[in-house]
Image (cartoon, rainbow, N blue to C red):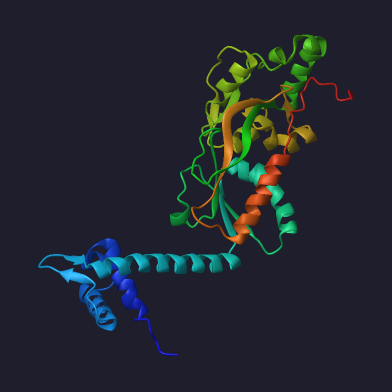
Amino acid sequence: MPRTLPPLDSLWAFHTIAETGSVTAAAAELKVTQPAVSRRLRELEAALGCALVRRGPNAISLTDQGKRFARELRQGFAQLQAATRNLQAQNAPLRIRAYTTWALRWLIPRLPRFEEQNPGIDVEVSTSTAVVDLVREGVDAAIKTAPVDHPPSPKARRLQPVMIAPFAAPKRGNARRAGASVQGRQLGDRLLAGRLPGDRLLGSKVRAGDWAVWQRHAGLPPAAPPLLFESTTLAIQAALEGLGTVICSPAFVQEEVHAGRLVALSETSATTGDCYWLILPEGRVSPALRIFTEWLMREAAAEDVVPTFAGQDTDDP
């Protein structure tokens, strides 16, 4: 079969010239010399039998044929890049970026179930609170919080609302139980949600306003500023050590509550107005990412976490 395509390096050199606007910029992009780029351009024009650029004393510009060819090359190279990414994705793990606490306490405990249902798809989790550039950082998808009615990107999928409630080590819960056992059912959750006098409030810098949200929800006056840690994980650990009462999602401390290491100081959770969002890349997603997305949406929809209140009689039906 006769060869009808010019050399690929010449095509790529012209594509880069068209994208950058000059031979000098193209040479810098391709990490070759200016004469090398000019030579590839001349070879391409000779192979095609037409002029692709107009050469001026200090600059070049695309001819009409060059402009049409550049547009078609751009589409062709985009398809080649997408095909390459999709092929590489079949053998590479999915790279998911998330907040530390959400990754440690929500996603990773569920991953064994995902891998059991989808053998052959590995998930690699990294953590950061910074804004993520999926393409530049080589990340397949990311988890971020944003207001419920303001998705952080055009293709973001809403996962679950950010819910909060106060939790403390058992010695604080026992003190709350004494007051709740006498009056709890009559006074209702508004009073039971109040913090203990002298409690130190614990939270994270990422969600520094959650205690103020809780105080409004519970009808409580503003309190002293909370002690803020770099992550909610650290604040939870501080609460486990008896250093104060942490505000966090009930989903993050289910294991500690069930084991009796933490108790909830309220029968209900408060909505913060934020949601966890799954940020997906523009364009088509890989089959593995599509499977992970569908699984993650099901897991989030199935979650129904209600705090176990410290003053609640566990013998009640």
Residue 134 placement, left or right of 260: left
From where the camera sits, is residue 28 visible?
Answer: no
Q: Is residue 60 above or below residue 290?
A: below
Residue 135 image position (x, y, % from top left): 46, 56
Residue 19: quadrant of the picture: bottom left
From where the camera sits, is residue 287 visible?
Answer: yes
Q: Residue at 68% across / 42% down in the picture?
A: 300
Q: Is residue 10 above or below residue 255?
A: below
Residue 167 placement, left or right of 234: right
Single out the residue that lies furthest toward the bottom. Answer: 1
Q: Is residue 94 above or below residue 258?
A: below
Residue 133 image position (x, y, % from top left): 45, 50
Image quarter hosting the C terminus: top right
Residue 73 placement, left or right of 301: left
Q: Residue at 82% across / 10% down in the picture?
A: 182
Q: How many marks can you see?
A: 0
Residue 291 image position (x, y, % from top left): 65, 56
184 or 20: which is nearer to us? 20
Image quarter hosting the N terminus: bottom left
Residue 2 placement, left or right of 20: right
Residue 295 image position (x, y, % from top left): 68, 50
Q: Is residue 270 above or below residue 290?
A: above
Residue 65: quadrant of the picture: bottom left
Q: Residue at 55% across / 51% down in the picture?
A: 141
Q: Residue at 69% across / 32% down in the picture?
A: 250
286 or 260: which is nearer to us? 286
Single out the residue that lies furthest toward the left. Answer: 57
